[in-house]
Image (cartoon, rainbow, N blue to C red):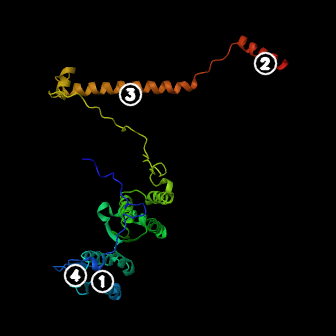
Amino acid sequence: MPSTNNAPKPWDTDDIDKWKVDPFLPSDNVGGTLAEESSFIVLFPKYREVYLREAWPGVTKALKNLGIACTLDLVNGSMEVKTTKKTWDPAAILKARDLVKLLARSVPAPEALRVLQDDVASDVIKIRNLVNNKEKFVKRRQRLLGPNAATLKALQLLTNTYIQVQGNTVSAIGGYKGLKEVRRVVEDTMHNIHPIYQIKELMVKRELAKDPLLKHESWDRFLPNYKKRSLSKRLKPHKVSEKKPYTPFPPAAEPSKVDLQLEAGEYHIGREAKKRIAQEERMEKQKAKKEEKKREREKDFVAPEEPVDGERKKKKRKTKTQDEE
């Protein structure tokens, strides 16, 4: 049977955006209301209590348009969202869950409410478990912010997202493509790769995307290629331990002190004779050292070799001839 995949499709033109997300309207829900009630509860820290109390009327109004009910429990420190009979979008409860998660992570309410849009998503990246040492974690988290939060602002502009670094997490809000880039940059930063390299790469990609001629070409030749630089050029360790060939037999036992005395014939000698022999050896060593030091001292008093009279005359003649020339 011939393949129909390559058949001409007159309705499939280049002006169609296949990645466009159409909004979900109440008329699209043919099935009617939801069969069961769904709810999510998210806890928030105590320092967010004052801000949430002020911003909660705006959150309630935004969720009411989607048919989602929400409650703020200041006693238990929790936020609850649940579906109602007026909920017409099945995915609305998931968006409301992401909204209360972001509010608990110190994201401002105007930015967090953008999650309710169809083309906007959120991502909460946990960064504490990526670094074991707490001091390194604090330094790398500060590296992500940069001086006066300049690195974070550059990353927000290049990815078209909103990023909030709070505690042990990084919250990001924006498009799916931007969130993917943000997660890559954050994880690489916590793995000790400076974010400036990723920012340079994003800037190059942004400029290349403007050129329609490079749309179907590979951009690898334009992107910066950073190689790892090893500080130490030493390829071998200082101490190279050579492995000895394996033998199933154990090594021979080293001779003991008694065996060495028997070989030297000193085992049966008395204690006084041993002392005398040891003293004689000591005296011989002292004598040898004394003579060596004496020879070194006499070197300073040795007269240098003087030239013979004939050699002196020849040298004088050579100097005279040189002067005449």
Residue 64: x %, y % from top left: 29, 86
Kind of residue indicated by mark 4: Thr
- Which residue was labeled with disc 3? 286
Q: Residue at x 48, y 48 (%)?
A: 221
Give the CA separation, mark 1 to mark 4.
10 Å
Q: Residue at x 26, y 31 (%)?
A: 243
Give the CA separation, mark 4 to mark 3.
102 Å
Q: Who comes first in sequence, dot 1 or dot 4?
A: 1
Mark 3 vs mark 2: give the one in front. Answer: 2
Give the CA separation, mark 4 to mark 2.
117 Å
Kind of residue indicated by mark 3: Gln
Kind of residue indicated by mark 1: Leu
Q: In the drawing, what numbered circle is on residue 319?
A: 2
- Which residue was labeled with disc 1? 63
Q: Visible in this render: residue 8?
A: yes
Mark 1 vs mark 3: give the one in front. Answer: 1
- Image position of 26 (left or right of 149): left
- Which residue was labeled with disc 4? 83
Residues tagged 4 and 3 counted as in contact (Cβ below 8 A)? no
Q: Residues within 10 Å of mark 2 (few under 14, many from 20)?
A: few
Residue 156: x %, y % from top left: 44, 68
- The residue lying toward the viewer, choosing from 211 and 165, is 211
Furthest residue in direction right, as rendered? 324
